[in-house]
Amino acid sequence: MPYWTRGKAGRETPEDLFRLLYLGWLVAFSFKVLGASWDVSWHFKWLRDDLAPPHLLNSVGTAIALALTIIHVYTGYGVDKMAQRLIAWGTGVFLVAVPLDLINHRINGLDITSWSPSHLMLYIGTFFMICGVIRGWFVRARPGRMRTMVLGGLFVFLFENVWFPAQHQEYGVYSIAAWDRGQPEAEPILIKFAADQIGLPVDDRAVALHFALPVPDQLYPLYAVIAAVLVAVYARAMIGRMFSATAVVAVYVAFRTLIWPLLALAGFPHSAVPVFLIVGALAVDLSFLIRIPALRVLVGSLAATVLLDQALRFQHATFIAPPLVTPMTMVIGWAGLAVLWAAAEWSFSRHTLRAQEREAVVSATATP
């Protein structure tokens, strides 16, 4: 309570309070990730319910995040202006998206796809929220192991949020395979609802395709090359340790690998695990050995695209993965990644987002 006073962003924050606030964010994002991971599997099995357990678990994280947002905005503790704005706007977009999503489901029925506009608003709001938290910790935390570990953890949460919509295709390929075997993983009430919504008989394979893989096949690999790799680029630059991007993606893949059998044992649908993403992150880490930014962008984007494509094909051939696409799709992905990576390199210098440069600034301001 002694700290509950009105203040501007960037005010001096006691060290204990600073750590407590960001511990709160780690707890909030943990609840949101657990709820969201369960939620995807839930919606491939049961008919949608506003008060489903995964939604309630996610809501706990949202409530903690809202409380922390209010603290940052009112007191100004623990954040600079940019971090405060990102957190506030992200939380605001998320809170607006919640009722819009409820209305969307009332009007459009099932709307199972992760790529619907109301769902995308939820991810976008969470994205800006996590970016603000990363910015706040990155700018104010003192150099050391704790700073690196927490920053890495926050990037894992960011990567999970960015990759979340792509899980639809990862669950979808298993859903189609189960349908073709005559052993659908979804409950009959969900299948009947889906069939009635598009006016087809329950035994029509189009029902499974319409809800399991409702987006173009090209979206999955393009999203992997552009969105996933770009998060890895920022993670490598801001954490500043060799193989930090690989570590972030590997932790996410490990989480998906561990939660997969738990959900399966509980009777929930299976999903493909995007192990191939680790190869793209490794390409990013190795590309940072190149000191010339322009050359790093060209070589890194090309290497990440080629290696991701080959790793995805290998996973598809040896285990299971979403449908493959033509090489031209990957050429488009490489071009998009190169442009965005170049923009990222500019932002590193413009906003002092490289780890070594920021640590020097923090050390200078923390030393009497």
Image (cartoon, rainbow, N blue to C red):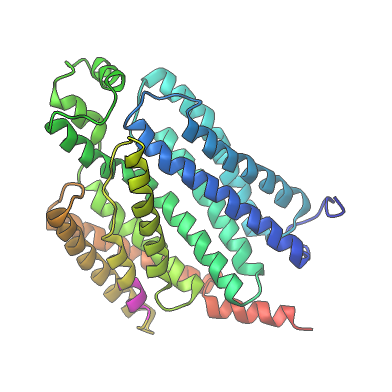
Residue 279: image x %, image y %? 28, 67
Please say whether residue 111 is one of the residues in the magenta stretch. Answer: no
Above or below for 65 versus 225: above
Say which residue appears at 37% left-offset and 69% top-offset: 246
Between residue 367 and residue 345, name the one nearer to us.
367
Above or below for 104 versus 341: above
Above or below for 326 versus 57: below
Residue 46's quadrant in the figure? top left
- Magenta-colored span: 283-288
Residue 186: image x %, image y %? 28, 28
Residue 204: image x %, image y %? 13, 22
Q: Looking at the image, can residue 28 be seen?
A: yes
Residue furthest to the front: 265
Assign the magenta stretch its main secondary structure: helix
Between residue 81 and residue 21, name the one nearer to us.
21
Say which residue appears at 71% left-offset and 62% top-offset: 18
Q: Looking at the image, can residue 114 be seen?
A: no
Residue 28: image x %, image y %? 59, 48
Above or below for 297 versus 223: below
